[in-house]
Amino acid sequence: MTSKAVLTRIAAALERLAPPPPDMPDFAASDAFVWQTGPARLVPVARVARVDIGLLVGIDRSRDTLLENTRHFARGLPANNALLWGARGMGKSSLVKAVHAQVRAEGLALKIVELSREDLPSVGDLLALLRGETARFLLFCDDLSFSHDDQHYKSLKAVLDGGIMGRPENVLFYATSNRRHLMPRDMIENERSTAINPSEAVEEKVSLSDRFGLWLGFHPCSQDEFLAMIDGYCAAHGVAVPPERLRAEAVEWYTTRGGRSGRVAWQFFCDLAAREGVALTG
């Protein structure tokens, strides 16, 4: 067998081993997609699970800031990648989805693509797929964080910085996390105390959060805000309960749960609606 034939066979074998390029999705099929791997593809979402932006109580400043930033991007103006960090259950991911719906309702064309932290290594394929498209895309990663031996953060830099090619002009990245620096505080302190060069030991990972131009903090809600959330849900879904009873049951609910949050308010409302015989739709 000639050397040319051998090289041809090797090239054919490598081509069979290489993953096929992602299929071009029909971007007109939906306004929302989920990025999946194995094989890499964008899966259209027929109905996004979200709440109306008017029902998100106690996060007015974050809501207004993120909404305005998203409007700028949808209009083709400069906009910042955003990190929504802070207390659990306070509506971080709900706000991202609600803002997307609000921008769409205002007549601005914008699509949202959700990807998981585990799929970050394939984000280069996703960016290549979106680059050059006329549509504008909001990439969304929920509950983003990294452990001490996690290398996924290097892939995230491709979204935030874009490498030599730069981040596609039609792509913006929003992430939610319980941690402002995307890594546990005790891990930061441990690396600083044990490393030969403490400042360099954590600089690479900690600086990752600095690449987000917009930081929005979420904090535990007050009792008044907690009750206002429930009042909003009751009004939106037609659940009528005497105020005194509603307040007493809501306070008892969050007391047994050990804290107040938007998630706890929704869980209480679901229980209340079931007891009142009201089916939740939409």
Image (cartoon, rainbow, N blue to C red):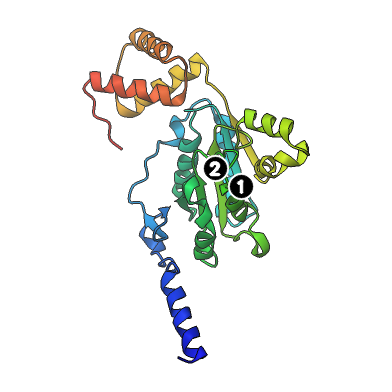
Mark 1 near mark 2, Cβ–Cβ under 8 Å?
yes
Q: What percent of the width, then of the height, locates residue 58?
A: 53, 25
Residue 154 percent location from the top left of the image: 61, 51
Viewer-side residue, 113 vs 151: 151
Secondary element at tag 2: strand
Q: CA distance from mark 1 to mark 2?
A: 8 Å
The residue that appears at 48% across and 51% down in the rendered structure is 119
What SS does tag 1 mark?
Answer: loop
Which of 133 and 124 lies nearest the eye of the viewer?
Answer: 124
Nearer to the camera, 23 or 247: 23
Q: Is residue 63 above or below residue 253?
A: below
Q: Which residue is mark 2?
A: 175
The foreground one among 139 and 10 is: 10
Q: Position of residue 172 (x, y in %)?
A: 57, 52
Please give left or right for residue 233 compared with residue 218 in the image. left
User: Which of labels 1 and 2 is toward the front?
Assistant: 2
For the point 47% across and 43% down, which residue is it? 102
Residue at mark 1: 81
- The N terminus: image quadrant: bottom left
10 Å crowding of disc 2: few (<14), some (14-19), many (20+): many
For the C terminus, which image quadrant? top left
Amino acid type shown at disc 1:
Asn
The residue sitting at 56% across, 30% down in the picture is 60
Asked if residue 156 can be seen in this view, the reply is yes
Residue 29, placed above or below residue 85: below
Quarter where residue 150 is shown: top right
Labelled disc at residue 136: none
Q: Amino acid at mark 2?
A: Ala
Does residue 219 lie above or below 79 as drawn?
Answer: above
